[in-house]
Amino acid sequence: MGPDLNVGTLVTVVLTVAVLPLAMLPALSVVVRRYGRLPAWPLLSALGLLGASSALAAFTVFPLPEPGQLACDGGTVATHAQLVPLASIPPILHELGEVGLLGTLTSFTFLQVALNVLLFVPYGFFLHQVTRWRPLVITGIAAVTSLLIEVTQGTAVFGLYPCPYRTFDVDDVLTNTLGGVVGLAISLAVARRPFANPARVPDTAPPSVLRRSLALLVDLLAATTLDVVVTLTLVAALADGATLEAAEARIDHPAIAIGINLAAFAAAVLLPSLLTRSATTPGQLLLAIAPVTFDDASRPRAARLIRRWGVRWVPWAIIPSLLPAIIGAELVSVLARRDHRSLSDLASATTMRTLAGIAQDRAATRPDDAVDEPA
């Protein structure tokens, strides 16, 4: 991205790219609640759905045109749209008659249509594997997703650019939807296999290292996305429409960067844990795990939650390059200790449990309802 790209554009681009992947994160929660754990195939399907949606979101926006290189002809959004269904078929048939089958299959005209189909095959496949929704619902979601992508492209990323750098093409919606249907058909066949339908197990055992790691990964994604958006928004406000280079120079001070990081990490991770009844961060809530006090398995008080957050997030906010070391130290502690407690667990005198396990413990310790004695 060139130095003249307005920071307001970057804010919207970040949000646009993050919307679809963030919307797919609940797939992890679906897997946990359906199977009581993270079995191999359902977990792979959830991660595949996240990856497929991330790829679609990236294709929606990137590559961005270089500043000053977007040539606008004065036309409207409508004049840059292709609204004739199946308009891509006649050129393919023409090439078939001109260069034969092999030449057509390797031509740009055919490959563009074929790639539009293939692009949505993983999305339709993994969406059905995770949700097991009815075929009509999966097809509708694939169509709506494609329509959203085309609208984003056809409106020049919702007006961020003076004219579209990609066109709205109704054939892309049709071919993308076809790709989703192909993925759905493959998923229907796979769904009959035993490995795709593992048995549910009680969700009361201590959460696995993988489950806790995925919860941390979700929190990292939420925190970093919010941090980038807050940073760019503040830069845009301070710059008042200046270039990215000039705007960054105005807040290029370590104290400001640390303050932004702390605020974003607190809003994304600490506040949810303080405000929710289960004391969970977004990632912990999705993976159905929660911290409890180590001695009596009760909900941690605010001071303990702040200590948990401080050990894991504050060093990173101050020195971002410490992130790998922090995660590594937490992981080593979990793997090395028999009770699988991390450094943040130890510092706050807490441990991690599944939500179902916590509910079971509370039900077991709840006294029976008292029976009134007759007068």
Image (tube, helix red, strand yellow):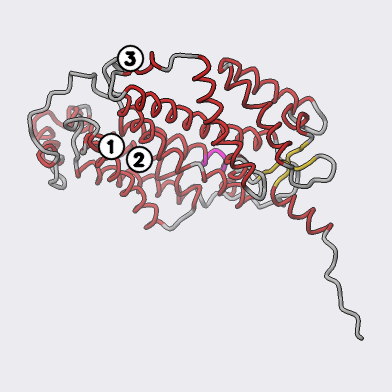
Magenta stretch secondary structure, dominant: helix
Q: CA distance from mark 3 to mark 2?
A: 40 Å
From this view, report whether residue 123 is shown above or below residue 209: below
Residue 80 image-quadrant placement: top left
Residue 197 shown in magenta? no
Question: Residue at the spot x=78%, y=30% of the render?
Answer: 346
Depth check, front residue: 280 or 244: 244
Q: Nearer the viewer, residue 275 or 78?
A: 275
* In the rendered image, the vertical position of residue 101 relative to residue 321, given as above or below: below
Q: Secondary structure at mark 2?
A: helix
Q: Which residue is mark 1?
A: 116
Question: Type of residue at label 3?
Answer: Ala
Amino acid carrying mark 1 in the image = Asn
Q: Which residues are magenta?
A: 42-46
**Could you tell me how far apart the alpha carbons at marks 1 and 3 are, in whole angstroms?**
39 Å
Mark linked to residue 246:
3
Category of crowding for the residue at label 1, using alpha-carbon neighbours closer than 10 angstroms: few (below 14), some (14–19), many (at least 20): many
Asked whether, in this view, residue 43 is left or right of residue 54, the answer is: right
Q: Is residue 43 magenta?
A: yes
Q: Which one is closest to the eye, mark 3 or mark 2?
A: 3
The answer to the question of whether label 2 and label 1 lie on touching residues, with beta carbons closer than 8 A, is yes
Give the quarter of the image for residue 149: top left
Residue 120: assigned label: 2
* Residue under the point 46% across and 56% down: 133
